[in-house]
Image (cartoon, rainbow, N blue to C red):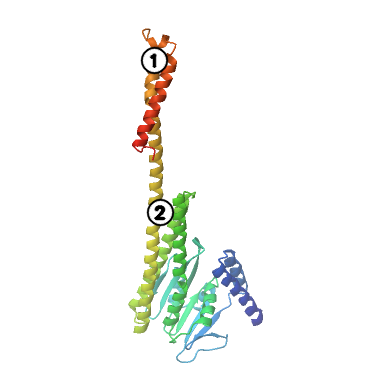
Amino acid sequence: MVSMDMVKYVKSCASAIVFNMICLKLPDCVMIYRKIYQGIGGVRMRYRLDGSIVPMGEDDDIRDGEALVDIITSEQYEDEYKKKFQKKMLLNIYHTHYCRADLLKDCVIGTFVIPRKDDLLGTYTTFGFYMTVEKLVLVDDSGIIETLVRHMAEALSVEKTYTAHFFFELMEYLVKEDVIFLQNYEKKLAELEAALLDGAITDFDKKMLTIRKELLALQSYYQQLTDVSETLEENQNHMFEEDDCTIFDLYSKRADRLFDNTRRLQEYSLQLREMYESQIDIRQNQIMKFLTVVTTIFLPLTLIAGWYGMNFVGMPELTSPYGYLVVIIVSIAIIIVEIWLFKIKKWFD
């Protein structure tokens, strides 16, 4: 039997690892945390909403007017809710690869699939949720959601004791730093543009392919967040109050702005692609221009060589002691005149 002190110690260490993963972007920390988290059986965490986010002990109960936030693993959820129809539905959609929310008669179930900012094309953070008016169950096997809720408990207060307001704050936390991330991504594209103009870039096609895939992943993610918030705002099961619908509408607009910013970055990347292709065309035109000039310069010399290469008997230049020298002088004169004409016409520019 694992003691509660040991559990708290291990959980605090695991939380520190996840915090480093989020702030320092260390990919291996996810697997380390997952092993620690699952090694202690996925310890269940419960929070009470009473104007703030308060951790609860195993024997604590919520009071009237309060709401409960329960963070459990998929295995714990399956054991506890195995007789509920919503359990089967949530576990079926838990393994989906996109964000969604389904409004049922007296609850909302759904999933979130969150791309990692340090590896947009790599692994995703996935968690499910089951929400009623007084209870929010977050199903998470990675332990990352618990860490986010811990930080929320330290930094936030919930004005109302509704699960909808807490869920809104959780969704806000998911995109808290996304504006800064997109700004940094724009700087990355600007640096790529500067390197492109300086001609100091290699593997441009490969880099642009990665950028396009990353932006498409972000664009899809923000579109899904917009769809989720709009579904909650519609309130077809009449589970939410008017204030709840208002805040979900605000979130929908924010996610839509992030979607627009991502689409703008995508257009920027397309402009870089067009710039790269235009530079290739310019270089090809310069090469063709150079070859044309060289061919034009030596065309008269080719004519002279072919003319005297016919070796007719009646050519006086062939028997003249000055014929060879005269042909050389004439050839050099022709080249000089052609180069002078080309400079006047600015063919060398």
Label 2 CA crowd tier, 10 Å (few <14, some 14–19, many 20+): some
Asked if residue 193 lies left or right of residue 19, the reply is left
Q: Residues within 10 Å of mark 1 (few under 14, many from 20)?
A: few
Task: Note whether 307 is above or below 196 in the view shown.
Answer: above
- Residue beneath disc 2: 272
Residue 79 in sight: no
| Closer to us: 275 or 101 | 275
Indicate the amino acid at tag 1.
Tyr
- Corner quadrant of residue 183: bottom left
Q: Quadrant of the N terminus?
A: bottom right
Q: Which mark identifies residue 75? A: none
Residue 310: % across, % down: 38, 13
Q: Is residue 296 above or below residue 125?
A: above
| Rendered location of residue 153, percent (x, y) | 52, 82
For marks 1 and 2, give the CA distance: 54 Å
The residue positioned 51% from the left and 79% from the top of the image is: 152
Residue at the image position 40 percent from the left and 35 percent from the top: 290
Could one spot residue 251 in this view of the protein?
yes
Q: Residue at x 38, y 18 (%)?
A: 306
Mark 1 sits on what residue?
308
- For residue 291, what is the image quadrant? top left
Pinpoint residue 159: horizontal percent, then vertical percent.
Answer: 44, 86
Query: Which residue type does callout 2 highlight?
Result: Leu
Residue at the far top in the pictured view: 313
In terms of depth relative to the viewer, which is nearer, 251 or 79? 251
